[in-house]
Image (cartoon, rainbow, N blue to C red):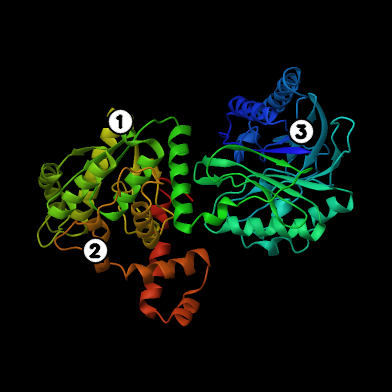
């Protein structure tokens, strides 16, 4: 059997457009003489559909689109060779609605010659991290193994699973959620499956790809059957799907591997298996982060209906890396930078902003904020006097004046966005957003927070990686000025300001954040295991809690 791994990039809710993508991928697979085409989980509607599946008519639309697609695929058999069978994903009404809870299933339909020949309902529904599937879906109750009518030759018995049925939380550190659950893969093999096919929509997380490969290898070698996993690719809101679909043989050898971060139709011939190279093996952590962010920006901008972006260029590392990622995603003509120097902006920061724009080949506007800042002084000072508060600039710039500068810049960017139709990108990183080192309605203004899940350490690593690999990243020259990388980070909202005036060194801050936010460790454990200053640890953990009200109002960020 020749199986095509159809790794597509669907748009959530764009049912008919997704079906067209699937038809084009099937045409490609048909040209390669595929017997079976496998699409990702919920490929008809895109993953995750969330509350869309509760809208009147949505399930019916998905079912009609699937049946129409299958009929159009069957028509391909009149041209080159028999049309391939197809496995696709869609939400469906539960065949046996439960007494309580959702009455919808996360399902696969198998079509051959235009007709439905099998249905499988996902059995393990993840409810952790970004997943909330038991809110929407009822679990399937039984394994499904089928034979495809593919002519007179020997027939393979195919066992169907969907995503979590295969991973069981092991890829994300949540295996304990399934301690009392059965093993859908083992049940498929017990029912006679000779190959496991598993459509998936597994979001990208740094390091998860290697764990995926190992889980696939474990299933294949334990049960002595080939395992085929087809993952969604593309960005959907905050989630990024990296693809990297794969097929492994009974001995654990990699038989087919789709590329990461792009659509692809990849063929595996189970009758003539041959090991192949793994694109994941050559992918460093820094390159994976870069590719994921580029895909996330490109798809977010495209799928919400924009064509171009605009962002502030401060001369600092965060705006430089954000701008470079935007150029890699959208092309230089679709990115505009805005330098907005204020009374405390240094000469080298302004120079670095312009140097960055030159290196990237983007248009850079200059809109100083000195005059708007001065215009605010009289009415604000009158208000401060009425409140018996010091005037702006009475001593050094205080928090009110610092935030006013940031909010003026945010207002200017939003006005330029309104006039040009460009989406504003915010540039704050995870380290800052976690502790509230950002200004509501100022530098937080915008439609997409590109670096909001990227620590300061990773921001610097991305800058260095892009410079060292500028050709493979499609830049004409190293994009980030060295002076931007080397200088101390600063918001430049008061004289001689640096980030470390308010925050601990970023290596300390990032380690506290990793342990507190990602590993959910207590302050006491962080202090004991790191030997960091107790007051510093408790202050940072407290700031994380206090900044939640800001994060609730932040732009969508790429996970």
Q: Residue at x 51, y 64 (%)?
A: 518
N-term mark: 3 or 2: 3
State how far apart marks 1 and 3 are (Cα): 51 Å
Q: Quadrant of the N terminus?
A: top right
Using the numbered discs, state the Cα–Cα distance from disc 2 to disc 1 in whole angstroms: 34 Å
Q: Residue at x 82, y 57 (%)?
A: 223
Residue 224 position within the rendered picture, expressed as x and y whole percent measured from the top left: 81, 56
Q: Position of residue 454 (x, y in %)?
A: 42, 56
Instruction: Identify which residue, 194 or 540, lies in the foreground.
Output: 194
Local packing at callout 1 (Cα closer than 10 Å; few below 14, some 14-19, many 20+) is: few
Name the foreground residue: 383 vs 222.
222
Real-space Cα separation, disc 3 to disc 2, in angstroms: 59 Å
Can you identify the residue that label 3 sits on?
35
Q: Quadrant of residue 39?
A: top right
Could you tell me which secondary element the residue under label 2 belongs to? loop
Q: Mark on residue 488?
A: 2
Question: Residue under circle 1?
Answer: 418
Q: Nearer the viewer, residue 312 or 406?
A: 312
């Amino acid at each position: 059997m020749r199986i095509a791994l159809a790794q597509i990039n669907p748009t959530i809710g764009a049912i008919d457009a997704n079906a067209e993508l699937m038809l084009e991928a099937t045409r490609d697979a048909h040209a390669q003489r595929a017997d079976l085409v496998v699409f990702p989980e919920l490929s008809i509607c895109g993953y995750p559909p969330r509350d869309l599946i509760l809208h009147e008519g949505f399930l019916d639309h998905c079912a009609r689109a699937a049946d129409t697609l299958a009929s159009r695929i069957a028509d391909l058999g009149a041209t080159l060779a028999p049309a391939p069978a197809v496995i696709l994903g869609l939400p469906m009404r539960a065949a046996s609605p439960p007494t309580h809870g959702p009455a919808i299933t996360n399902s696969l339909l198998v079509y051959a010659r235009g007709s439905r020949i099998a249905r499988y309902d996902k059995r393990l529904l993840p409810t952790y991290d970004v997943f909330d599937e038991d809110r929407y879906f009822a679990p399937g109750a039984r394994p499904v193994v089928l034979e495809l009518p593919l002519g007179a030759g020997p027939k393979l018995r195919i066992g169907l699973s969907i995503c979590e049925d295969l991973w069981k939380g092991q890829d994300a550190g949540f295996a304990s959620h399934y301690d009392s659950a059965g093993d859908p893969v083992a049940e498929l093999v017990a029912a006679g499956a000779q190959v496991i096919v598993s459509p998936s929509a597994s979001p990208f997380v740094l390091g998860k790809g290697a764990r995926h490969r190992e889980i696939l290898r474990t299933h294949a070698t334990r049960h002595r059957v080939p395992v085929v996993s087809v993952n969604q690719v593309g960005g959907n809101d905050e989630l990024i799907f990296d693809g990297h679909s794969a097929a492994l043989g009974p001995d654990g050898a990699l038989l087919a591997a789709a590329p990461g971060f792009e659509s692809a139709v990849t063929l595996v011939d189970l009758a003539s298996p041959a090991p192949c190279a793994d694109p994941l093996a050559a992918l460093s952590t820094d390159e994976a982060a870069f590719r994921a962010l580029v895909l996330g920006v490109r798809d977010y901008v495209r799928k919400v209906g924009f064509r171009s972006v605009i962002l502030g260029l401060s001369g600092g590392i965060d705006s430089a890396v954000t701008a470079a990622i935007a150029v890699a995603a959208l092309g230089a003509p679709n990115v505009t930078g805005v330098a907005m120097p204020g009374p405390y902006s240094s000469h080298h920061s302004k120079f670095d902003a312009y140097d960055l724009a030159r290196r990237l080949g983007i248009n850079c506007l200059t809109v100083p904020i000195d005059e708007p800042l001065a215009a605010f002084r009289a009415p604000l000072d009158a208000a401060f006097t009425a409140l018996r508060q010091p005037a702006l600039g009475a001593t050094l710039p205080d928090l009110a004046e610092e935030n006013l500068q940031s909010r003026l810049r945010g207002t200017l960017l939003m006005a330029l966005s309104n006039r040009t139709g460009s989406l504003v990108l915010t540039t704050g990183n995870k380290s800052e957003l976690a502790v509230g080192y950002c200004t509501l309605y100022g530098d937080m203004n915008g439609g997409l927070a590109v670096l909001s899940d990227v620590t300061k350490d990773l921001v610097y690593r991305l800058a260095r990686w892009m410079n060292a690999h500028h050709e493979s990243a499609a830049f004409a020259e190293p994009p980030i000025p060295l002076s931007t990388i080397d200088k101390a980070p600063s918001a430049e909202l008061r004289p001689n300001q640096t980030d470390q005036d308010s925050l601990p060194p970023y290596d300390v801050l990032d380690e506290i954040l990793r342990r507190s936010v990602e590993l959910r460790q207590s302050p006491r454990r962080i202090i004991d295991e790191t030997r960091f200053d107790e007051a510093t640890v408790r202050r940072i953990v407290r700031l994380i809690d206090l900044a939640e009200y800001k994060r609730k109002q932040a732009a969508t960020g790429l996970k």
